[in-house]
Amino acid sequence: MRVSVDQDKCCSAGNCVLLAPEVFDQRDEDGIVVLLDERPAERLHAAVREAADICPAGAIRLNE
């Protein structure tokens, strides 16, 4: 799995960070998503998929 994020689409909801904190973080100044790991370990795939599915802005893209 390869993860990418579109910071321009991000609405700073933070759901991705709650679901997969090893993969996503947020900038302190505005809450915009920061990708920490574009190729997460397999044990994180389910959480990353859920984060992408519930992202209200559709800012997370997965390539599997």
Image: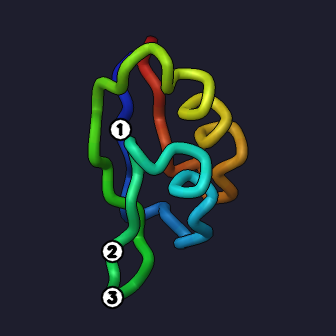
Q: Position of residue 47 (x, y in %)?
A: 60, 33
Q: Secondary structure at mark 2?
A: loop
Query: At 49% from the left edge and 64% from the top edge, which residue is drawn?
Result: 10
Residue at 59% across, 56% down: 18
Sequence-earlier tag: 1 or 3: 1
Residue where numbered disc 1 is placed = 4
Check the image and report above or below for 58 versus 12: above
Q: Residue at x 57, y 65 (%)?
A: 14
| Residue 50 percent location from the top left of the image | 67, 35
Read off the residue under disc 3: 29
**What amino acid is labelled 2 in the image?**
Arg
Query: For numbered disc 3, what is the local secondary structure?
Result: loop
- Which amino acid type is shown beneath numbered disc 1? Ser
Circle 1 sits in a helix, a strand or a loop, which is it? strand
Disc 2 packing (10 Å; few <14; some 14–19; many ≥20): few
At 39% across and 68% down in the image, what residue appears?
A: 26
Mark 1 or mark 2: which comes first in sequence? 1
- Residue toward you, 60 or 24: 24
Q: Residue furthest bottom?
A: 29
Instruction: Give the Cα distance between marks 1 and 3.
Output: 21 Å
Residue 38 spot, x, y in % from top left: 28, 33
**Mark sitting on residue 38:** none
Q: Is residue 62 left or right of residue 39?
A: right
Q: Is residue 10 above or below residue 54?
A: below
Contact check, label 3 and label 2, Cβ < 8 Å: yes
Figure quadrant of the C terminus: top left
User: Depth check: 12 or 36 in front?
Assistant: 36
Place residue 57 in its image quadrant.
bottom right
10 Å neighbourhood of mark 3: few (<14), some, or many (≥20)?
A: few
**Residue marked by disc 2:** 27
Task: Characterize the local packing of mark 1: few (<14), some (14-19) or many (20 or more) Cα atoms within 10 angstroms.
Answer: some
Give how far across and how far down residue 24 sits, in percent.
41, 51
